[in-house]
Amino acid sequence: MRRENAVPGFGRNRSRGGVAAFAVVLLAVLALLIRAGALKRRGLIIGAFAVVYAIARTTSEFFREPDAQLGFLWGGMTMGMLLSLPLLLAGVGFIVYALKHPPLGSRR
């Protein structure tokens, strides 16, 4: 079975290396936050995860072809980019919540 759009020596999806690189960056950012004491602030780790993941997902969408049935949508964005926007906003909301409230174990 031959794939028409495949490049010899590469799989059909050539963006896997970029996704793996983003996963390493995500792990490093979360590890640094944990070492800095982010677990004492409720919502900071999940907020950071959501923001970094949404940015990585949006960036990786620049290197992919858009879905054949959808193409480019509103403002030249792909569906993956549009679906990352609510995740980014939720992550920012978690971070704002975490920074407005006192750390766990501290007295007001």
Image (cartoon, rainbow, N blue to C red):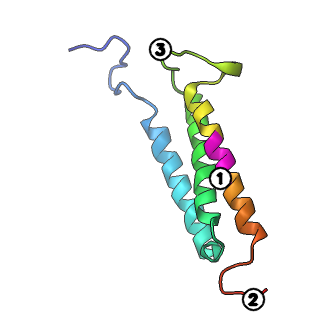
Which SS class for mark 1?
Answer: helix
State the residue lying farthest toward the left.
1
Residue at x-position 57% and y-position 63%: 30
Above-or-below relation of 52 to 7: below
* Mark in the foreground, 1 or 3: 1
Q: Looking at numbered disc 1 in the image, what kind of residue is underneath it?
A: Gly
Disc 1 from disc 3: Cα separation: 30 Å
Above-or-below relation of 76 to 43: above
Q: Which residues are drawn in magenta?
A: 86-91
Residue 50: give x, y in percent of width and height.
Answer: 59, 51
Residue at x-position 53% and y-position 16%: 70
Residue 87: give x, y in percent of width and height.
Answer: 61, 45
Residue 23: give x, y in percent of width and height.
Answer: 49, 50
**Label 2 vs 3, first from the N-terminus:** 3
Residue at x-position 65% and y-position 45%: 88
Q: Identify the residue under disc 2.
A: 107
Disc 2 from disc 3: Cα separation: 55 Å
Residue 82 lies left or right of residue 15; in this view the side is right
Disc 1 from disc 2: Cα separation: 26 Å
Q: Identify the residue under disc 1.
A: 91
User: Is 90 in the magenta?
Assistant: yes
